[in-house]
Image: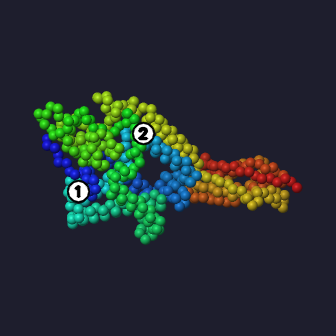
Amino acid sequence: MPAARTIPIHPAPGSATALQPRLTRGRFNNWRVALIVVTQAVFFGLPWLNWDGRQAVLFDVARQQFFVFGLNFWPQDFIYLAALLMACAFLLFWASTLAGRVWCGYACPQTVYSTLMLWLDRLVEGNHIARARLAARRGSSEWLARKGVKHALMLLLCAWIGVTFLGWFVPLREVVARLPAGLTALEWGWIAGYGGFTYVLAGHLREQVCKHMCPYARFQASMFDARTLVVDYDSARGEPRGALRKAASAQGACVDCGICVQVCPVGIDIRQGLQYECIGCAACIDACDIVMDKLGQPRGLIRFSSDTHRQQPGSAAFTLRDWLRPRASLYAVLLLTVTLATGIALMQRQPFKLDVARDRQQLARETADGQVENRYLLQLGNSAGVPQDVELQLQAPPGIRLLGTPPVRRIDAGGNAQWALTLTAPAGQPSSPITLIAQSRSHPDWRVRTSSRFIGLPPR
């Protein structure tokens, strides 16, 4: 089988020619496409979903409230965000320990948007060979026309990405209804900023971000061990490489077709060993498997492997021992602990926030009828997704009572209410701790309490 012609996908130093990766197909590419579809369906689709009459997920920074499927979080609920970030970090560490940079190759926004831009490249300019030929005619009328159309499509895509990004912080339906003249300068700034960064990083820099700007490539080795799966070329089987010849008894399985290099999105040759630029996308595995199928040879010349498996030929690719090794188990336990603790805390979380402040100008005063009064200002927040009729209750020593009937207030979903409260007691009532309880009339188990103190005055 003659060697396939290798196109110049590696530009010479100082050349204006861009990397032109070849698209491939296969099981790993199917996983990558599926994750792109899922992540972008969440990013573009979730802001359009309504829940209890409002946007299902909305990070309303202006009002300092965050709505997530009927749950309303306040700035004081920062602990939940911290727990989410910790869980994401442990998940990343666990996945990296097991299979290297799978996050980079399949779900990283830079990889996802670079792939979308590559699809636009192919749509407008053709396959990798056509793109390389077009790049060689830089400045021609065809080059200008195709580049113009492609970048116009990229800008449209990035503009909609920017609008959708803003829609996570301002109701997206409202944003679309106010386009284009109704948006503020700040809102346009967020659209232009996020969309512009996407256009520059994914539309132009692409693999350069992974190779030179992303810090993850530099410290990923700290999470690797001897059993971490990485993309590996079987040099014992593949070498010496060269065109397939029947007479060559010592011929290796690699026919030096160069397809593994052509499909690499960062432009490396995996046959030279694992390099820090490799993002673990496995495009080279899919491409090589296709070649092996055509040659009638077993797949796996390029595969996911580890140092341990490489030293044990014929061993299973991934065993239970690999899953349960100490480092992976530690990350899994930490991830499970944080996730369970956060889930339990959310299930036990009360939808009310009650704060009480005293009248600091006059802690206590004596009335004409000999009673002692303390005044308080209550602030109650309703983080539930529906309005609530909330009744205030008092737990205090005998003699201390609410002035007037117990207050009941209706609080809108995600809203706040405040009211002044007066407690009274006979003169001579000693200072005592008190407890104020806010309870929903429709959901008696929704209740929150806070402590304060009643200041008494000695009798005259």
Q: Is residue 362 left or right of residue 183?
A: right
User: What type is the residue that disc 1 sits on?
Assistant: Arg
| Residue that protrudes farthest toward the front in the picture | 14
Q: Is residue 145 above or below residue 436?
A: below
Q: Pointer 2: what residue? A: 223
Number of numbered discs: 2
Disc 2 crowd, CA 10 A, few/some/many (<14, 14-19, 20+): some
Secondary structure under tag 1 reads helix
Q: Nearer the viewer, residue 183 or 407?
A: 183
Q: Are circles 2 and 1 on residues that touch, CB within 8 Å?
A: no
Image x and y of residue 445, in percent: 61, 47
Q: Is residue 65 left or right of residue 41?
A: right
> Distance of mark 2 from mark 1, alpha carbons?
38 Å
Q: Nearer the viewer, residue 360 or 445?
A: 360
> Mark number for residue 131?
1
Q: Is residue 18 left or right of residue 108?
A: left
Can residue 126 be seen in this snapshot? no
Q: Residue at x 44, y 60 (%)?
A: 166
User: What type is the residue that disc 2 sits on?
Assistant: Met
Q: Earlier in the sequence, mark 2 or mark 1?
A: 1
Secondary structure under tag 2 reads helix
Image x and y of residue 409, in percent: 64, 58
Q: Residue at x 64, y 53 (%)?
A: 354
